[in-house]
Every structure is written in C-alpha cells, then in structure tokens.
Image: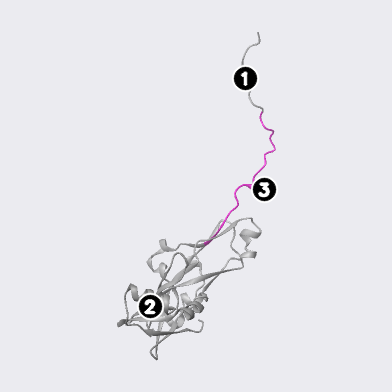
C-alpha cells in the first residue's frame, strides 16, 4: 500500500449550480461532497491547483486520501468525478468516508508486465489484447493495494488470463468472483495467429480445370 494522498478542503455553505460555477470561474476552486459512515454529507470546496497536481498520480483514483476539513482529517476514497466533456476540466468530486475496520470496494488499476517477452506474441506470433485495465476489489482500507500486477511472460497463443488467475495480496478479494464462476471473465488474451507459415502445404499437384469439351464425342 502506498502512502496516503493528502488534500485540504473547506466547508461550503453557498450551494447550487450558480455558486458552483462562480467557484470554478472566479476563485479557481472545485466543488465537492463527502458522505458515508453514517455521518451527514458535507459540501466542500478544494483548490483546483491542488486537485490538478493530485490527479496526475494514478494512485489518486484508487487509494486512501487524508482529507483535512476545517482542521479535522477524514479518511476517504474518490467515489465519483464529473468533468467538462469539452476540456476535461474537473467540475465536481465525490468522496466516500471509510473506516479502518470496515471492508471497502474499490477499483484498482492493472499493471501488465513482461509483455515484450510474452511467449504467445514473441515466439508464436499471437496478438495481445487487454480486456480490462482495472479491477474491483474488496478489502480493509489497510490492505488496499496501489495496483495489481499481471505477468504476461508465459502466456501462450490462444490462452487468456482470467480474474481467478490474478495474483492478489493477502486480505484482498476480487469482487466479481463472489457472484459465481460465470463472472470469471478474461483480463487479457493472446489471440493465436490465423493462417501464415504454419499452414500445411500439400505435395499433391493442383488438379487442372475440367475442359468444357469433356465427355463430348469428336465430330
């Protein structure tokens, strides 16, 4: 588990779409909210500059955040982000409070390693495909991994890595697998080459096309 990310927020009393637009435009602030753990939701404002820096790190989207609000620190994870579709500017952020002794469901990134030496690609000429880039896990906050590694070195052509094949840390479970074997979907696949040099070549000569005159009597 990586060190917690730290952010500072202020309580927000001026709410509504107009107030949120003013925050983003005039004060370079981002509106947000924190909820969960049986406590009342709190409306927040955060520095757009601080948020921009934090969001450059992959861990921001899946790791625990120490959120300082009015001098008190709450531990939370990012639950939702709203962006401007035109320029990707952050419009609003939702935080979910967490408790050290309660399991959480979080999506963490998959890191694919040894792709350059993958047997199915390098030796057998297959094509590697990522079917997923992140996976939802269940664990206590203290066991939350920064990412899950997927080793592709020994994957042969025609073979897929499924959720159940992932090597996960102790105390971590793949959320989908709790719902049965039919949820054990592929994470990555190496598709076998179609045709090519491995096709069998017949030693038999090609048959000449039948003559239009075949079977006709000479005249």
Q: Earlier in the sequence, mark 2 or mark 3?
A: 2
Mark 1 lies on residue: 212
Q: Secondary structure at mark 2?
A: strand
Mark 3 lies on residue: 197
Looking at this view, is 160 or 21 the one in front? 21
Q: Secondary structure at mark 1?
A: loop
Q: Position of residue 49 (x, y in %)?
A: 48, 79
Task: Specify whether 1 is left or right of 152.
Answer: left
Task: Specify whether 124 is left or right of 75.
Answer: right
Q: In the drawing, what numbered circle is on residue 46?
A: none
Residue 201 against residue 111 in the figure, above or below? above
Q: In the drawing, what numbered circle is on residue 32?
A: 2
In 3D space, how far apart are the residues under numbered discs 1 and 3 (Cα atoms)? 36 Å
- At x 43%, y 67%, the residue is 84
- At x 51%, y 74%, the residue is 58
Q: Position of residue 194 (x, y in %)?
A: 59, 49
Q: Secondary structure at mark 3?
A: helix
Q: Is residue 146 visible?
A: no
Q: Earlier in the sequence, mark 1 or mark 2?
A: 2
In 3D space, how far apart are the residues under numbered discs 1 and 2 (Cα atoms)? 82 Å
Magenta span main SS = loop
Q: Is residue 128 visible?
A: yes
Task: Quadrant for residue 19, please give it.
Answer: bottom left
Q: Position of residue 56 (x, y in %)?
A: 52, 75
Q: Position of residue 124 (x, y in %)?
A: 64, 56
- 10 Å neighbourhood of mark 3: few (<14), some, or many (≥20)? few
Q: What segment carries the magenta color?
A: 188-207
Residue lying farthest front? Answer: 26
- Magenta run includes residue 206: yes
User: Which numbered disc, 1 or 2, marks the residue closer to the eye?
Assistant: 2
Task: Specify whether 144 is left or right of 128.
Answer: left
């Amino acid at each position: 588990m990586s060190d917690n990310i730290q952010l500072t927020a202020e309580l927000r009393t001026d709410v509504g779409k107009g107030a949120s637009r003013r925050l983003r435009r005039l004060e370079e602030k981002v509106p947000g909210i924190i909820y969960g753990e049986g406590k009342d939701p709190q409306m927040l404002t955060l520095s757009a500059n601080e948020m921009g820096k934090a969001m450059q790190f992959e861990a921001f989207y899946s790791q625990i955040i120490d959120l300082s609000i009015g001098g008190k620190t709450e531990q939370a994870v990012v639950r939702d982000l709203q962006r401007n579709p035109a320029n990707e500017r952050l419009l609003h952020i939702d935080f979910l409070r967490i408790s050290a002794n309660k399991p959480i469901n979080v999506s963490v990134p998959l890191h694919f390693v040894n792709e350059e030496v993958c047997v199915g690609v390098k030796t057998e000429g297959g094509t590697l495909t990522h079917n997923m880039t992140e996976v939802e896990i269940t664990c206590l906050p203290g066991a939350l991994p920064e990412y899950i590694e997927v080793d592709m070195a020994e994957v042969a052509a025609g073979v897929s890595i499924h959720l159940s094949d992932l090597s996960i840390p102790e105390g971590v479970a793949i959320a989908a697998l709790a719902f049965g074997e039919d949820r054990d979907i592929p994470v990555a696949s190496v598709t076998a080459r179609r045709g090519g040099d491995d096709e069998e070549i017949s030693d038999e000569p090609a048959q000449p096309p039948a003559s239009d005159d075949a079977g006709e009597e000479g005249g």
